Amino acid sequence: MFDVIIIGGGIVGLATGYQILKEFPDKKLLVLEKEKDVGMHQTGHNSGVIHSGIYYKPGSLKVKNCRYGIELLKKFCDNNDIQYEICGKLIVATRDDELPVLANLFERGKENGIKGLMMVAEEEIKDYEPHAVGEASIFCPETGIIDYLKVCQKLSEHINEKGEIIIGAKVSGITPKTNSILVTTEKAEFHTRFIINCAGLFSDKVSELAGLERKLRIVPFRGEYYMLKKEARHLVKNLIYPVPDPRYPFLGVHFTRTIDGEIEAGPNAVLAWAREGYAKMDINFKDMWDYLSYSGFWRMARKYGSTGFEEYYRSFFKSAFLKSIQRLVPDIKEDQIETNPAGVRAQALDPQGLLVDDFVIKNTNNMIHVINAPSPAATSSLSIGMHINKLYSSIIN
């Protein structure tokens, strides 16, 4: 009998296990991960950015956990010899109509407690990024870069000292019993007193297995990247972002220097045809039917159909993708970029067709479900884990 089973070995599930075992070292805790290793999906396919919290609604779970999560993450890395760098980033307005949005973003960043924010005039942009252009920009000094898989590996080591992680264990059933919950996997059956669902792309499916109504539906959006070839890396020093469209919870195609010195460009946001649809032609008809049969999907399609078409066009035509990044760095040429592995974002959609922007965490008397944890979940992971641990503690005591 386990005290706690965590379903999902991404960074949020591992951070949650780590935080619970820090407070309750005698609890018998198990993490179940369906893949051959931890962090194989959203955690292992993101751009490795430590987000500052500038974009998020003041008072939201996102901003609270991001702001606290940064400090927890840096401390964890310092204590465990994990490399990271706080290098800062530019958010660049390339059109006049983006300037009011940029100004609002600056005020939001100050309200969210980000230190050292600076408005950068057009003629000063090249002091930060010599090859970038724009009407104006924000320099955000608290943004950084990291390899989140290395964080996952170290979290796994800590969990295995007091708890257990089983890989290749896909959960197929959750059955309440008189004094326990039976969790069925392809490998074995496990009894537990408490379940924490951190299943990412399948969080809504797991909640349904546990008996909850699926009011929100996870819709997969593929984020495709290009990599700058070695001879073009000098064109980007650190991180360069566009002004995001406030209608969407996506940040737009941007440049990121990775912790190992490469330069990524991306991601876009293309509706995927499978929950784990990393390639353009990955199709899972069951996954497609799951969102096509949901009324909220068609409401979303009516609102954002033209934008969705533009994303598909940019996905299939390299020249269109190039044009979007040349808005920020015009000197980049088509033969200087090459395709890089894509990621898939688990995005919750509500019945009204709205893309859910904030984290969504629900609990019952013996379960906690992380239904929506998009970016900045990796940055926020240790804070989310602490939040879940507090929920868990309040429920069992």
Image (cartoon, helix red, strand yellow):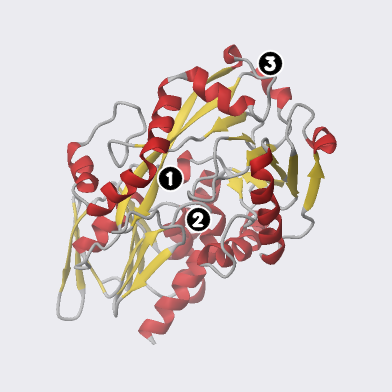
Specify few, some or many for label 3: CA neighbours under 10 Å numbering under 14, 14-19, or 20 or more.
few
Furthest residue toward bottom: 397
Give the residue at mark 2: 377
Identify the disc placed on residue 263: none
**Amino acid type indicated by mark 1:** Gln
**Amino acid type indicated by mark 2:** Ala
Q: Name which of mark 3 and mark 1 comes first in the sequence.
A: 1
Q: Report the residue at 48% width, 64% height from top.
A: 18
Residues 123 and 357: in front is 123
Question: Label 3, label 2: how many angstroms apart (C-alpha)?
Answer: 33 Å
Q: Name which of mark 2 and mark 1 comes first in the sequence.
A: 1
Furthest residue toward top: 335
Specify few, some or many for label 2: CA neighbours under 10 Å numbering under 14, 14-19, or 20 or more.
many
202 left or right, relative to 334? left
Question: Label 2, label 1: how many angstroms apart (C-alpha)?
Answer: 10 Å
Q: Name which of mark 3 and mark 2 comes first in the sequence.
A: 3
Mark 2 vs 1: CB contact within 8 A: yes
Q: Report the residue at 45% width, 26% height from top.
A: 314
Quadrant assignment for the N terminus: bottom left
Specify few, some or many for label 1: CA neighbours under 10 Å numbering under 14, 14-19, or 20 or more.
many
Q: Position of residue 92 (x, y in %)?
A: 69, 40
**Amino acid type indicated by mark 3:** Glu
Q: Position of residue 266 (x, y in %)?
A: 54, 33
Q: Is residue 179 visible to the viewer in this orientation of the structure?
A: yes
Q: Report the residue at 64% width, 50% height from top.
A: 101
